[in-house]
Image (spheres, grey):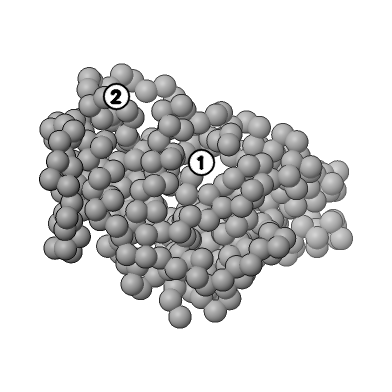
């Protein structure tokens, strides 16, 4: 059975957008997010080829009604995505398809919930999730692990059960309660005042769970902390519901192995997209790995509109960029 690679799409798009700044084509079209995604897709092609791994790029689509009912201000702290990034999304999606990856999305579903439901719907598959989102750590088990993009941009760090325990101080089964206690500023979920990561990990380690703490508050030695937890019981319950990822597919969904089947990259289409945006280094990379027949019958003037290689450099020295939000703290409004 082929393993699955599931990519948290917007998290990766944001990461690439902020990593590559002030890149445009000869006509001024912003291309930094497209360029970064092309490099990422080339790495996936090399490390997780289509003839060995299935999978999909999973996208957020619309607002999660069940969370907004619990917390109308859920993710309300996120600024809108920059216009020059939004303009690149259709091209990024075309590029992903050209590399042979299915795109997976569902109205009113967040990508994290879809990824969670997919891990549950295909229990016979080994699954790797490409994301740095700590919410997804609740899904990790002997069969499911995360591939967290390294800060150096050179590869992925495996986050398995042991790595979750080392990073958070709790096993994957304790992540929901851990996040309910400390909160999640990226999603505008406040935790319990005065409870940080170390305290949360200690509480879960000593007491087992939030349910156990609320059932027997006396198990918490600190009177001040005990009072905060008891007084915040309703808040904790709400946080648990907000953090807990959905496990079942959307109503009426008919999921099958075929929807996660990848195809071989369409190198001709990839080169065409790169040429239109003057991404000449991507063209060179593609030509190095494409089969000799990949460009048979391609138009002789495919590159007529392509600018010289220098087009991939900024048109002018980059001004100091304004302080930016974390790459997972933007909001698209589709």
- Picture disc at residue 191: none
**Would you say 167 lies left or right of 204 here?**
left
In this view, the residue in front, 291 or 214, is: 291
Relative height, residue 192 to residue 21 (above, below) = below
- Determine which quarter of the picture holds residue 178: bottom right
The 10 Å Cα crowd at callout 2, few under 14, some 14 to 19, many 20 or more, is few
- Where is mark 1, residue-wise? 328
The 10 Å Cα crowd at callout 1, few under 14, some 14 to 19, many 20 or more, is some
Rendering coords of residue 115 (x, y %): 57, 59
Question: Which mark is first along the chain, 2 or 1?
Answer: 2
Secondary structure of the residue carrying numbered label 2: loop
- Where is mark 2, residue-wise? 28
Relative height, residue 105 to residue 191 (above, below) = below
Rendering coords of residue 22 (x, y %): 30, 27
Q: Is residue 61 visible?
A: yes
Q: Residue at x 36, y 48 (%)?
A: 95
Secondary structure of the residue carrying numbered label 1: loop
Rendering coords of residue 319 (x, y %): 31, 19
Q: Residue at x 73, y 44 (%)?
A: 65
In this view, the residue in front, 126 or 34, is: 34
Q: Compute the Cα span from label 1 to label 2.
A: 26 Å
Q: Residue at x 48, y 66 (%)?
A: 260
Rendering coords of residue 52 (x, y %): 35, 73
């Amino acid at each position: 059975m082929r393993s699955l690679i599931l990519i948290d799409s917007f998290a990766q798009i944001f990461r690439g957008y902020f990593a590559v700044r002030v890149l445009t084509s000869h006509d001024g079209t912003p291309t930094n997010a497209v360029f970064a995604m092309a490099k990422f897709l080339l790495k996936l092609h090399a490390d997780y080829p289509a003839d060995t791994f299935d999978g999909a790029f999973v996208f957020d689509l619309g607002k999660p009604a069940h969370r907004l009912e619990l917390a109308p201000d859920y993710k309300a702290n996120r600024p809108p995505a920059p216009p020059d990034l939004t303009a690149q999304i259709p091209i990024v999606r075309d590029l992903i398809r050209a590399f042979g990856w299915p795109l997976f999305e569902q109205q009113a579903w967040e990508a994290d919930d879809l990824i969670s439901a997919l891990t549950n719907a295909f229990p016979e598959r080994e699954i790797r999730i490409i994301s740095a989102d700590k919410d997804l750590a609740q899904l990790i088990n002997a069969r499911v692990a995360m591939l967290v993009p390294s800060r150096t941009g050179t590869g992925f760090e495996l986050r398995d059960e042991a790595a979750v325990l080392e990073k958070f101080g709790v096993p994957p089964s304790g992540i929901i309660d851990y996040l309910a206690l400390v909160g999640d500023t990226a999603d505008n979920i406040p935790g319990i005042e005065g409870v940080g990561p170390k305290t949360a990990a200690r509480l879960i380690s000593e007491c087992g769970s939030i349910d156990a703490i609320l059932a027997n508050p006396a198990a918490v030695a600190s009177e001040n902390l005990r009072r905060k937890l008891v007084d915040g019981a309703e808040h904790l319950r709400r946080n648990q519901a907000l953090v807990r990822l959905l496990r079942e597919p959307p109503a009426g969904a008919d999921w099958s192995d075929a929807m996660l089947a990848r195809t071989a990259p369409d190198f001709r289409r990839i080169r065409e997209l790169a040429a239109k945006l003057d991404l000449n280094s991507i063209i060179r990379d593609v030509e190095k790995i494409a089969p000799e027949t990949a460009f048979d019958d391609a138009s002789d003037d495919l590159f007529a509109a392509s600018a010289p290689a220098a087009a991939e450099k900024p048109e002018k020295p980059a001004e100091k960029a304004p302080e930016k939000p974390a790459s997972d703290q933007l909001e698209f409004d589709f």
